Image: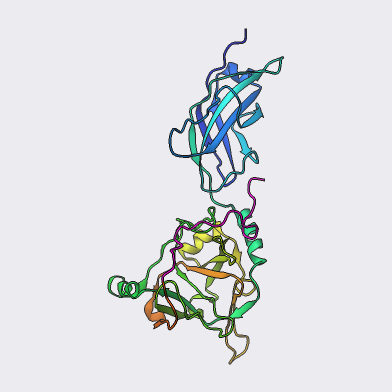
């Protein structure tokens, strides 16, 4: 009679990406020699008992031929970025009658998948380019807020709008979520006037700063996200970082770098002749969210009252993108 297999132990997860991981564990030399298959059970971490495998004597997920450990796992599930998972393993010997002699399931181990890799961001960038539309001229970056915000900046921050941590809104796998600090600005203009919209859901006051103060040959521009929130319009998140800054160093290894003078979202064309104006343009068919990674002093611009409506809308903080939208979602794990 075949001797029982020992329970796999010391489960180790390594080389985790947004759509793959490697898994290994310890077995006795005897089990290593005779195991023909591994069973791997994977599920998202949820509330309640983490040991949720109901049919522990039946392989319910992945059946893989025994290979040297750690083994790579990818493509078998559509893993989501930045998502917590639970995994357990079982070793097996396939017998002559086709049945399996199996070990007990290992203990359940938890891990979290990673951010989008550069290749995934480039896929997302390609989709965003298709939705950008034509370029329109603009002259100022702006930030709409309530009077209390600007009063706080003046009295408590010495007039500096300080960078704040990016929330988790947008694509779940964007590398800047909860990792990069910045000051969010807008630059979209009305099609008919070429000026910022009079209406604002964020407050009746607007800080505006000449575009050239932030967008110039001393700054780098990065693509960070493309998403929608169950609406017809889409958002593109860009990061503006002064060259050599801490934010620039973070972005350089995590985000696609854009050519300031030739990209479909936000461009800076310096004057070629004396008397010519520097040209600043923004994409017309998407809403640009520009994250500037350094503090901005109110004295660099001006605070003006907005003449239109400014009824506060529902907050978009930590709002997730529509996972069913075919325009702004990419496939990972394939």
Between 158 and 272, which is closer to the camera in this rendering? 158
User: Where does the magenta region start and end?
Assistant: 312-334
The location of residue 210, given as percent across then percent down, is: 48, 81
Q: How is the image coloured?
A: rainbow
The location of residue 212, given as percent across then percent down, is: 51, 80
In the image, residue 162 above or below residue 77: below
- Residue 241 appears in the picture as rendered: no
Residue at image coords 52%, 29%: 53
Residue at image coords 40%, 66%: 163
Between 309 and 15, which is closer to the camera in this rendering? 309
Between 317 and 84, which is closer to the camera in this rendering? 317
The location of residue 226, given as percent across then percent down, is: 58, 62
Residue furthest left in the image: 155
Quadrant the C terminus occupies: top right
Residue furthest top in the image: 1
Classify residue 97 as left or right of residue 163. right
Residue 100 among those drawn in magenta = no
The location of residue 199, given as percent across then percent down, is: 47, 78
Quadrant of residue 58 within the rendered picture: top right
Residue 317 among those drawn in magenta = yes
Quadrant of residue 263 within the rendered picture: bottom right
Quadrant of residue 165 within the rendered picture: bottom left
Classify residue 134 as left or right of residue 86. right
Quadrant the N terminus occupies: top right
Residue at image coords 51%, 69%: 290
Between 261 and 19, which is closer to the camera in this rendering? 19
In the image, residue 277 above or below residue 189: below
Residue furthest bottom in the image: 275
């Amino acid at each position: 009679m075949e001797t029982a297999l020992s329970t796999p132990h010391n489960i180790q997860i390594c080389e985790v990406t947004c759509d793959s991981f490697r898994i290994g564990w310890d077995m006795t030399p005897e089990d290593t020699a005779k195991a023909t298959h591994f069973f791997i059970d994977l599920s998202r971490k949820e509330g309640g008992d983490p040991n949720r495998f109901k049919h522990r004597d039946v392989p319910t997920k992945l059946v893989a031929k025994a290979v040297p450990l750690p083994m790579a796992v990818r493509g078998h599930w559509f893993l989501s970025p930045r998502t917590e998972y639970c995994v357990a393993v079982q070793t097996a010997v396939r017998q002559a009658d086709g049945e399996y002699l199996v070990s007990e399931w290992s203990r359940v181990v938890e891990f979290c998948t990673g951010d989008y890799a550069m290749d995934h961001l480039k896929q997302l960038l390609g989709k965003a380019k298709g939705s950008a539309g034509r370029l329109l001229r603009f002259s100022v970056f702006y930030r709409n807020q309530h009077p209390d915000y600007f009063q706080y900046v003046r009295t408590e921050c010495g007039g500096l709008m300080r960078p704040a941590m990016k929330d988790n809104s947008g694509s779940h796998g964007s590398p800047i979520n909860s990792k990069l600090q910045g000051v969010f600005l807008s630059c979209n203009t009305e099609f008919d006037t070429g000026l910022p919209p009079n209406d604002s859901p964020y407050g009746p006051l607007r800080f505006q700063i000449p575009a050239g103060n932030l967008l110039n040959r001393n700054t780098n521009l990065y693509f960070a996200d493309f998403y929608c929130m169950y609406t017809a319009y889409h958002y593109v998140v860009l990061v503006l970082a002064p060259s050599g800054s801490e934010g620039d160093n973070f972005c350089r290894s995590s985000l696609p770098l854009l050519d300031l003078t030739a990209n479909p979202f936000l461009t800076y064309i310096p004057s070629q002749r004396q008397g010519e104006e520097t040209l600043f343009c923004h994409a017309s068919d998407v809403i640009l969210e520009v994250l500037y990674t350094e503090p901005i002093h109110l004295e660099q611009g001006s605070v003006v009252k907005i003449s239109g409506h400014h009824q506060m809308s529902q907050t978009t903080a930590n709002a997730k993108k529509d996972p069913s939208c075919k325009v702004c979602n990419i496939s990972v794990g394939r």
